[in-house]
Amino acid sequence: MDRKDNIKLQRLYELYEQPMYRIAYAVLHSSELAEDAVSDAFLRIIKKLGRIGEPESPKTRSYIVKVIKSTSINIYRRNRQFYIHELPIDEGTMQIPDPSANVEEKAVSEDTDTLLSSVSETDRSIMIMRSGGMSWKEVAVRVSMTESNVRKRFERARKKVIEMRGEK
């Protein structure tokens, strides 16, 4: 990309990022998925940057709206498809905690439970599965999301837990 394209992309971002987010949020009803949709849409826009006219033109605006709508709808369909199928219950879900565990382990566990309660159930599951050694792909299949969505949600949840602990 040359300097002219960089300037054009920066101007497109300044003009359209927030309206694109609002459109994506209206379709997806999730701030995380809306952010992902905007990112995916800009990746599509970058590929066609040479064909895009002036950022302020009505034709460019129309193109941007079409891209974010189609990107959001694709994400919605992909996620809806995952949620249609019932997730299997694995053996780890059915395990009952050992009552003979020592007091120190219980205190650490209670502290961890308190920190994890600050994030959504899905994010908590993602964090637990990742700390259990599962790959991004395995976690994505289990929670019926894309790998990129799982990574982003893990990052956000991790940041929130760190803030709750007062480390940052």
Image (cartoon, rainbow, N blue to C red):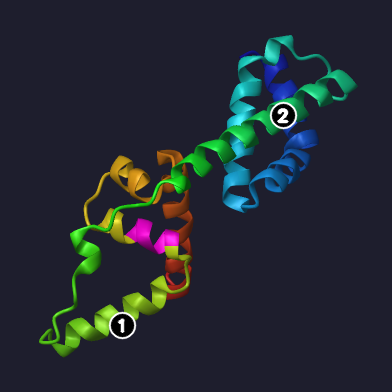
In the image, farthest residue toward the front: 85
Residue range in magenta is 122-127
- As for residue 126 lying within the magenta part, the answer is yes
The image shows residue 162 at horizontal and vertical percentages of 43, 67
Mark linked to residue 128: none
Q: Is residue 99 above or below residue 31?
A: below
Q: Is residue 34 above or below residue 120?
A: above
Location of residue 17 (image quadrant) = top right
Q: Is residue 107 left or right of residue 113?
A: left
Q: Total label count?
A: 2
* For marks 2 and 1 on the same chain, the one whose residue lies earlier in the sequence: 2
How crowded is the residue under tag 1: few (<14 C-alpha within 10 Å), some, or many (20+)? Answer: few
Q: Which residue is mark 2?
A: 10
Q: Secondary structure at mark 1?
A: helix
Q: Identify the main secondary structure in magenta.
A: helix
Q: Quadrant of residue 137?
A: top left
Vertical placement of 9 versus 85: above or below?
above
Query: Would you say 123 lies left or right of 139 here?
Result: right
Image position, residue 16 (x, y; %): 77, 35
Side of 48 where 163 appears, left or right: left
Pinpoint residue 71: horizontal percent, then vertical percent: 63, 31
Which residue is at 84% across, 17% downward?
54
Nearest to the observer: residue 10 or residue 128:
128
Snapshot quadrant of residue 146: top left
Q: CA distance from mark 2 to mark 1?
A: 47 Å
Residue to which mark 1 is pinned: 110
Residue depicted at x 31% and y 82%: 110
Can residue 130 be seen? yes
Residue at (52, 43) in percent of width and height: 80
**From what the image shows, is residue 95 above or below residue 14?**
below
The residue lying at 29 percent from left, 53 percent from top is 88
Q: Nearer the viewer, residue 142 or 120?
A: 142
